[in-house]
Image (cartoon, grey):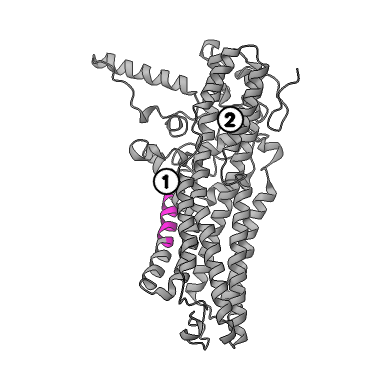
Amino acid sequence: MESTPLLGCNAPTKPPAFWDSLVPGTHERRRWPHILWFILKFLNLYYHDRVVMTRKCHICRVKDYIERKRRVSFARRTIMSPPRTQTMDYLILAYEGDEKATDDITSCNSISEQERCEVCDFLWWNSEGVPEVYNEEDIGVARWNHRGSGLLSVFLLLLAASVLCYNGIVPFISYWAKPYQTLYLMLKTTLIIFISTFPLLSLCSKIRSFSRSGLASRFSWATVLNVRYLIVRGQFLNLPQKGLPGMWILVLSVGYVLIIQGYRAAIFLYISECHITPYTIATTIAGILFCEMWGLLTYIVFFIRTSFHSQLDLVLAYLKENEGEERKCRGVLLATMADLLCFEQFCDLLSAIIFPCLVLAVVTNATRDYLLSEVDCVIEDPLIRNVQRNISWLGWTETASTAVIYLLAPGGFQANYLRDQFFINLIHLQAEGKFPRFWRRLVDDMKHLESGSGIILASLVFSVIGVYGGFEFHDQIVVHLSKSCGLNISTSDVCI
């Protein structure tokens, strides 16, 4: 019988023992591309602690936790209390814990066979399914994640959030209770929500890292923006030899922002003959930086998706190779699916924010073009007509390029197709397997995973509201830059 096809790469050979795979003197060879660390630095994603720590599987962590509780209970001669739910959260234990750094771990070749756990070995797999321990010096992140990186990141994100709040509140106050400015207010609001997405999501990730219990423990999706999580994703991509995956996506994500923002600056500073002021310069620079953050966020999503393609292939090969060893295989499956579900939740939340923004952008741009076509006959100044035509092109270009870039990053508005493909391959392996009970347990584990999110329903509701609002616009000012640039046109000429 033919072997089950995997998700896109050849099945690796059985990985050797964990500590036997360590190769001394290969630190320089294992350095990851500097551009990856620059992207994380630009996005203010660095951690307040070491980013490469010792790793244990969930079973070993639970055993250690219970053992510590027993020691404390015995010392105090009290009855051991059951572990708290938030303390046993897998993602918090895996990425927010205070483990020891791995600076000297590669020299610890004296660990006994009894202390080794193959599920823990899985957490160090490289792109070939071979456990390979590394530290911050090995991969080159040590010089980028220095003391104070966490506080500096939080400060810059708070500064960015403050700037965005100011630029969002001021127009809202200025155009409040002015029905003829509703269309412009919605255009401005859509843009502010769009560029605020990354700073706000990143702040949630920081809050989760600093506060590991309470409400913050519910933000499991925020782990995706934890640099420890991203480093684990990178180890499945063979970065030292192949470099960053999808460089064309990176160039496209960064380049389209520069082109669009350059076009925007040309309209407002050159085509419309507006006067250059310190405020317009600051606004242009801030807009470029915030939009670049968005572009790099889409590449991070693509980076994670590509990593899961490689990891899921390795996990399928591991399950097939270790058929019948239920404890090891279920432990590997648990760790993989926990990370994958975290990524799916993040993509669902991102889609719930971006999809309504795209719908509102389409509605408002189409409405503006329709209203503008009705007043175009009364606009005699060719400069005004040229400005409005370029603004229309700018709006449609921004909307279309944003939709295309975002759809390319996770492979659609939802990322659960990765889990669906993995489940289909798991069913194929079950049909070919020799241990029906073993495969049935794994399939049952997969069936118990969450299959959807209510966030998408909320995004559809807001989108319908946006479409309805588009049909209700009337008496709107549809000619921009007339007041700021001194163009001679009256309000009565541009309202419809």
Q: Which residues are magenta?
A: 153-164
Question: Which kind of residue does numbered mark 1 sit on?
Answer: Cys
Magenta stretch, main secondary structure, is helix
In the rendered image, the vertical position of residue 415 relative to residue 61, given as above or below: below
**Furthest-right residue in view?**
2
State the residue position of label 1: 204
Q: Position of residue 383 (x, y in %)?
A: 61, 84
Q: Residues within 10 Å of mark 2 (few under 14, many from 20)?
A: many
Q: Where does label 2 land, which residue?
A: 134
**Who comes first in sequence, dot 1 or dot 2?**
2
**How many marks overall?**
2
Q: Residue 155 location, x and y as percent? A: 41, 52
Q: Which residue of the protein is positioned furthest toward the left in this rendering?
A: 77
In the rendered view, tell whether residue 327 sits above or below residue 310.
above
Q: Confirm whether the magenta stretch covers residue 79.
A: no
Q: Nearer the viewer, residue 69 or 415?
A: 415
Query: Residue 177: x, y in percent?
Result: 35, 72
Whether residue 363 sits left or right of residue 173 in the image: it is right
Give the residue type that dot 2 points to.
Tyr
Residue in view at x 53 percent, y 39 percent: 344
445 left or right of 68?
A: right
Quarter of the image with the N terminus in it = top right
